[in-house]
Image (spheres, rainbow, N blue to C red):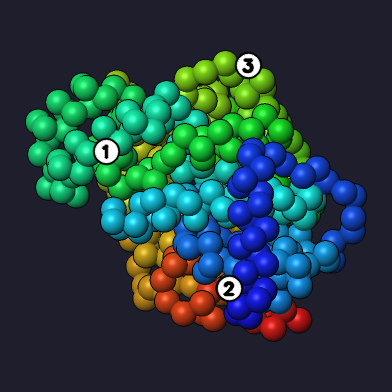
């Protein structure tokens, strides 16, 4: 990436951070290129490099005027414990940089890591979170974490469902990030879903027929992306309007975790699974697993959240590749999963396009962005 362009983009981000939480309103300009970016859990420099490689950055360090970029969420939390401060700053720069663009040029969708700022960690301060994290770091050992010690930990910190959440999952949380997320929620800049076409929906992890039934959308409209987005965003907007403190809950859609109820549940956490051991987990809502055969027929959902490795483990064994777009197609009975953009499908099929390609791993040139207009990967030269 051109160093001068990188410095302009970084300066724009730093100016946005310094200004404090804010959001630029839509300007009503026609955009001719509509692109989805999978989970941007990577250094801000890396995100900018990817956008530049695909011809999406303008000479001023922002997005080109003809571009509408949709970020599928999870703008925070990655990397080792030794880099937490740098990573925390990087995630904040990214969110501020995106929010500095007009709302019709940069669409910010919520992921579970974004909601964690106002969910599980809503009542923490920087000082109390650091105290909890010091303890968590001493205890956390992956699958070998001592169960008795973990029970004692969450008894002391009842807002947390696990040691892992403080030590790894939401490990770069900061109060300043929470302030930004809250502002962008109240400004209706952070959204649950974005309708990119008549039957083309973008959101973090996907919804099933059960999820749409929960929000009261009649079955005859489940293939209408606009109606689905309106219903999902409506639940969030009403919840935010009524929210006066504590963890933000989106009734039926998102329940943050805690010591009493366990891990967070809902549409920002859930992943597809056909595993026998998940048979009970996919029933009802909210949940952390869903049966892909229950996706709404006629609707194409573009999602992040789930990498190829996890889909291979939960749905369809096969070779794993990072960076590439992937798709799942079902008619309610069969489930087909493969690398590459989605094929042509009919009204009797549901489609899911996966865009989380592990952004911080591998070569930047190998990471694919999704062109919502052409329904394929964006060429590296942007043409």
Name the N-terminal-most of marks 1 and 3. 1
Compared across the picture, whether 305 is left or right of 138 comes to right
Q: For residue 264, which numbered disc appears in the image? A: none
| Quadrant of the frame with the N terminus | bottom right
Q: Does 93 appear above or below 175? A: below
Q: Does 374 appear above or below 14? A: below
Q: Which residue is mark 1?
A: 133
Q: Quadrant of residue 133?
A: top left
Q: For residue 242, which numbered disc appears in the image? A: 3
Q: Is residue 285 visible?
A: no
Tell me the SS state at disc 1: helix
Structural distance between the alpha carbons of marks 1 and 3: 30 Å
- Mark 2 Cα-neighbour bin, 10 Å: few <14, some 14–19, many ≥20: many
Residue 134 image offset from top left, x and y in percent:
22, 39
Compared across the picture, whether 64 is left or right of 83 comes to right
Name the N-terminal-most of marks 3 and 2. 2
Q: Which residue is mark 2?
A: 49
């Amino acid at each position: 990436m051109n160093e001068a362009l990188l410095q302009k983009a970084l300066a724009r981000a730093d100016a946005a951070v310094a200004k404090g939480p804010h959001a630029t309103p839509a300007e009503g300009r026609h955009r001719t290129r509509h692109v989805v970016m999978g989970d941007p859990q990577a250094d801000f420099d890396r995100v900018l490099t990817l956008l530049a490689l695909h011809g999406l950055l303008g000479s001023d360090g922002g997005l080109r005027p003809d571009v509408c970029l949709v970020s599928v969420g999870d703008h925070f939390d990655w990397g080792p414990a030794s880099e937490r401060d740098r990573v925390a700053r990087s995630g904040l720069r990214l969110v501020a940089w995106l929010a500095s663009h007009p709302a019709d040029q940069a669409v910010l969708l919520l992921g579970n890591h974004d909601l964690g700022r106002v969910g599980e960690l809503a009542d923490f301060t920087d000082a109390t979170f650091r105290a909890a994290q010091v303890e968590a770091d001493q205890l956390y050992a992956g699958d070998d974490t001592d169960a008795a010690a973990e029970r004692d930990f969450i008894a002391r910190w009842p807002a947390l469902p696990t040691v892992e959440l403080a030590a790894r999952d939401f490990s770069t949380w900061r109060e300043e990030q929470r302030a930004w997320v809250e502002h962008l929620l109240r400004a209706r800049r952070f959204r649950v879903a974005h309708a990119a076409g008549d039957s083309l929906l973008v959101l973090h992890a996907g919804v099933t027929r059960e999820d749409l039934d929960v929000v009261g959308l009649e079955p005859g409209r489940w293939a209408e992306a606009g109606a689905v987005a309106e219903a999902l965003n409506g639940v969030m907007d009403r919840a935010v309007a009524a929210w006066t403190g504590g963890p933000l809950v989106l009734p039926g859609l998102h329940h943050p975790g805690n010591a009493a109820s366990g891990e967070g549940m809902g549409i920002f956490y859930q992943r597809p699974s056909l595993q026998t051991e998940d048979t009970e987990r996919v029933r009802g809502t909210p949940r952390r697993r869903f049966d892909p055969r229950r996706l709404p027929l006629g609707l194409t959902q573009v999602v992040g959240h789930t990498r190829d490795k996890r889909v291979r483990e939960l749905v369809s064994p096969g070779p794993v590749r990072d960076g590439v777009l992937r798709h799942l197609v079902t008619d309610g009975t069969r489930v087909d999963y493969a690398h590459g953009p989605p094929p042509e499908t009919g009204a009797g099929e549901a489609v899911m396009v996966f865009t989380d390609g592990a952004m911080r791993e591998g070569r930047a040139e190998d990471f694919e962005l999704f062109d919502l207009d052409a329904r394929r990967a964006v060429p590296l030269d942007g043409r």
